[in-house]
Amino acid sequence: MDASSSCRRTLPADQVDLAVEVFRMLADATRVHLLWALIGRELPVGELASHVGKPVPSVSQHLAKLRMARLVATRREGVQIFYRLENDHVAQLVTDAVHNAEHAGPGVPGHHRSDRELRALHTEAGA
């Protein structure tokens, strides 16, 4: 669909309000890190806290907000709660935001690099 044939329907106010809430949730670096970490997998709070370098209570508060905004879902296994993205749209939204941000930096954005370049980039980042 090109610009001349784009959708012109009026959005219901409640959908606009929900979209604004999603953007509000994405307006926090810790929450973006958490959502990014959950793309394609589920993780318990402790691993997420370690991943983002924040204390478990802080991460739990962020996850509660993300859950209330329907961006993450949970699954209990014994005493442990696992978090995952609510749906593929959340993964796409976060991925698109990160890829858009990569275009603001110098050089070739990471998502435009070859497989070999990406492996080297991730090896450097992990070293």
Image (cartoon, rainbow, N blue to C red):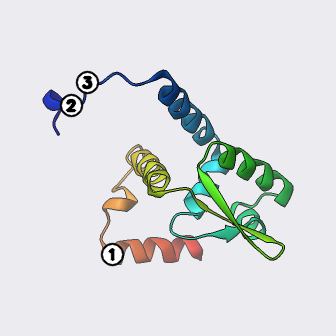
Circle 3 residue: 8
Instruction: List x then y, in percent, for residue 46.
Output: 78, 68
Q: Secondary structure at mark 2?
A: loop
Who's the residue at 68% across and 44% down the image? 68
Which sits earlier in the primary sequence, circle 1 or circle 2? Answer: 2
Q: Amino acid at mark 2?
A: Ser
- Dot 2 crowding, Cα within 10 Å, few <14, some 14–19, many 20+: few
The type of residue carrying mark 3 is: Arg
Kindly indicate the quadrant of the structure image that contains residue 20: top right
Left or right of residue 6, residue 50 in this image: right
Element marked by disc 1: helix
As drawn, 28 above or below 4 = below
Q: Residue at x 33, y 75 (%)?
A: 115
The correct choice, above or below, for 60 with respect to 37 in the image is above
Among numbered discs 3 and 1, the one appearing first in the sequence: 3
Residue 112 placed where, x, y %?
31, 60
- Pointer 1: what residue? 115
Q: Quadrant of the C terminus?
A: bottom right
Q: Which mark is residue 104?
A: none
Identify which amino acid the numbered label 1 is placed on.
Asp
Q: CA distance from mark 1 to mark 2?
A: 34 Å
Mark 2 and mark 3 residues within 8 Å of each other at the beta carbon = yes
Find the distance from the CA under tag 2 to the CA under tag 3: 6 Å
In this image, 115 relative to 104: left or right? left
Residue depicted at 44% across the width and 51% down the height: 89
Name the residue tied to disc 2.
6
- Callout 3: helix, strand or loop? loop
Please tell me in which quadrant of the rendered image residue 81 appears.
Answer: bottom right
